């Protein structure tokens, strides 16, 4: 069986999956399976591209002899480096909102209550009314969510209502 008979269709199929999952992630339509598929299929795609280049060794070598090809490859590397240098590590325009939510979830009920113009007792009552058990006002929202097996955002929703 020729290497080309399975490497090329495999490369095309993997490229389609990595492309689709990449677009979904770009538009923040993310989930753990999408991210996992993107990452692992991407690694397999790298291997199949390497096999594809080996299979077409002469054409690959001829391609890299062209100065226009090398210029384009160099430009891509430079642009990638610039993006890496200027885009913040946490990235995204919603990182501030995520930071606020993370800090809110890691704060005790006694502090979070103030954000919603409630006393600690009122916050605990609202959470209890939504079926959530709170041990004391020093317990964090993350701990409460974990102990009650409820999504953390449900606690915030309960405090807002």
Image (spheres, rainbow, N blue to C red):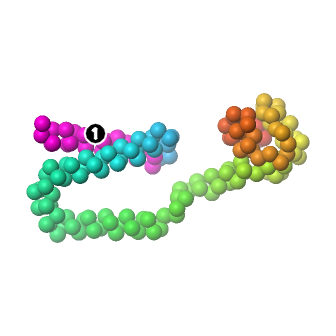
Quick one: quadrant of the C terminus?
Answer: top right
In this rendered view, identify the residue nearer to me: 147 or 74: 147
Crowding at dot 1, Cα within 10 Å, few <14 / some 14-19 / many 20+, comes out as some
**Residue at 41%, 68% in the rendered image:** 82
> Does residue 67 lie above or below 128 as drawn?
below
**Residue at 31%, 64% in the rendered image:** 76
> Does residue 89 lie above or below 157 as drawn?
below
Q: Quadrant of residue 69?
A: bottom left
6 inside magenta stretch: yes
Label 1 sits on residue: 13
Q: Is residue 61 left or right of residue 154?
A: left
**Residue at 25%, 46% in the rendered image:** 48
Q: Is residue 82 left or right of residue 4?
A: right
Q: Is residue 8 left or right of residue 101?
A: left
**Residue at 82%, 38% in the rendered image:** 134
In this rendered view, identify the residue nearer to me: 12 or 96: 12
- Where residue 57 appears, as percent x and y from the top left, is 13, 55
- Where residue 112 appears, as percent x and y from the top left, is 79, 49
Residue found at the far front of this picture = 1
98 inside magenta stretch: no
> Does residue 138 lie above or below 83 as drawn?
above
Majority SS type along the magenta span: helix
Q: Is residue 139 left or right of residue 43?
A: right
Quick one: quadrant of the N terminus?
Answer: top left
Which region of the structure is painted magenta? Answer: 1-26
Q: Report the number of numbered marks.
A: 1
Instruction: Using the rendered image of the protein, determine whether residue 150 is visible from the camera's viewpoint.
Output: yes
Q: Quadrant of residue 8?
A: top left
In this rendered view, identify the residue nearer to me: 149 or 73: 149
Q: Judging from the image, what secondary structure is the residue with disc 1 in? A: helix
- Where residue 143 appears, as percent x and y from the top left, is 73, 43
């Amino acid at each position: 069986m020729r290497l080309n008979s399975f490497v090329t269709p495999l490369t095309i199929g993997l490229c389609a999956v990595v492309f689709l999952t990449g677009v979904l992630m770009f538009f923040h339509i993310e989930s753990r399976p999408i991210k996992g598929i993107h990452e692992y299929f991407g690694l397999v795609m790298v291997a199949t591209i390497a096999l594809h280049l080996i299979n077409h060794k002469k054409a690959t070598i001829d391609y890299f002899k062209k100065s226009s090809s090398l210029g384009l490859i160099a430009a891509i590397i430079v642009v990638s480096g610039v993006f890496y240098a200027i885009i913040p590590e946490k990235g995204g325009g919603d990182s501030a909102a995520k930071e606020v939510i993370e800090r809110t979830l890691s704060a005790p009920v006694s502090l979070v209550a103030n954000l919603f113009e409630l006393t600690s007792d009122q916050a605990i009552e609202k959470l209890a009314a939504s079926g959530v058990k709170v041990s004391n006002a020093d317990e964090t929202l993350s701990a409460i969510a974990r102990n009650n097996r409820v999504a953390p955002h449900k606690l915030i929703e309960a405090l807002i209502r």
